[in-house]
Amino acid sequence: MKTEPQTFSIDDLKKSKNSISSWDGVRNYQARNFMKDQMKEGDLVLIYHSSCKEIGIAGLAEVVKEAYPDHTSQDKKSDYFDPKSTKERPIWYMVDVKWLKTYNNILTLNSIKEVKEMSESPITKKGNRLSIVPLTEKQFKSLQKLLK
DNA sequence: GCCAACGTTGGC
DNA sequence: GCCAACGTTGGC
């Protein structure tokens, strides 16, 4: 899962109550579908920092609550408000994640690009804008070897 | 700050 | 349903 650390970093997640936070503000259908269809309780999640000084994987988290309606889409005052999303028919969803680990070093995008298992992943492709990308077991394991 | 990539919108 | 225009993302 991707996040801009200026907005919400792995440290912010850690500092949240019980180190748990809802992952709101996803406003992309593909990413939403990954959340709804694929993210199950107990799944491990790598947290990726984007649009910042040190781009790459910063930490590890766990899904503690599966997809449920993102109420910020119905909050007029929220930056994430979407008039098309209603209580009866919510369009947007969020999950809750729990902080597990902050890695000693960011695993930089450059290093990720050198992992051959990642060559097919959207993460290493130019123009990637997906904020949620599923990883295969193989991809996850090869990344984990590089994470401390 | 630039620019490529790509999602979304809206006119037809 | 097509596609041009536009907006946003994100790496550099």
Image (spheres, coloured by chain):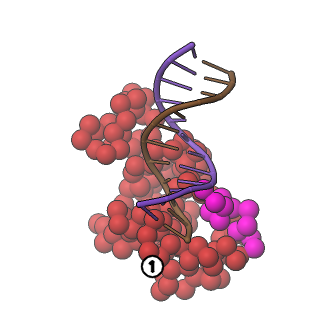
Chain colours: A red, B purple, C brown
Kind of element beneath mark 1:
strand
Magenta span contains residue A123: yes
Q: Amino acid at mark 1?
A: Thr
Between A141 and A110, the one nearer to me in the picture: A110
The residue under label 1 is A102
Q: Residue at x 73, y 67 (%)?
A: A119
Expressed as whole percent of the image width and height from the top left, the position of residue A109 reads 58, 73
Residue at (71%, 76%) from the top-left corner? A115
Number of residue marks:
1
Where residue A26 appears, as percent x and y from the top left, is 45, 48
Q: Residue furthest left?
A: A77
The image quadrant of residue A86 is top left
Q: Residue at x 61, y 76 (%)?
A: A110
Q: With respect to residue A4, does A59 lie above or below?
A: below
Res. A36 visible in picture = no
Q: Is residue A37 above or below residue B4?
A: above
Residue A143 is a magenta residue: no
Residue C1 place in picture, x, y as percent:
68, 22
> Please, which chain is the residue tagged with disc 1 on?
A
Residue A16: which quarter of the image? bottom left
Instruction: Write the start and end of the magenta stretch as one range.
Output: A116-127
Mark 1 surroundings within 10 Å by alpha-carbon count, few (fewer than 14), some (14 through 19), many (20 or more):
some
Relative to A148, say whether A134 is above or below.
Answer: above
Query: The C terminus of chain A lies in which quarter of the figure?
Result: bottom right
Judge from the rendering whether residue A13 lies leftward or rightward of residue A122; answer left or right.
left
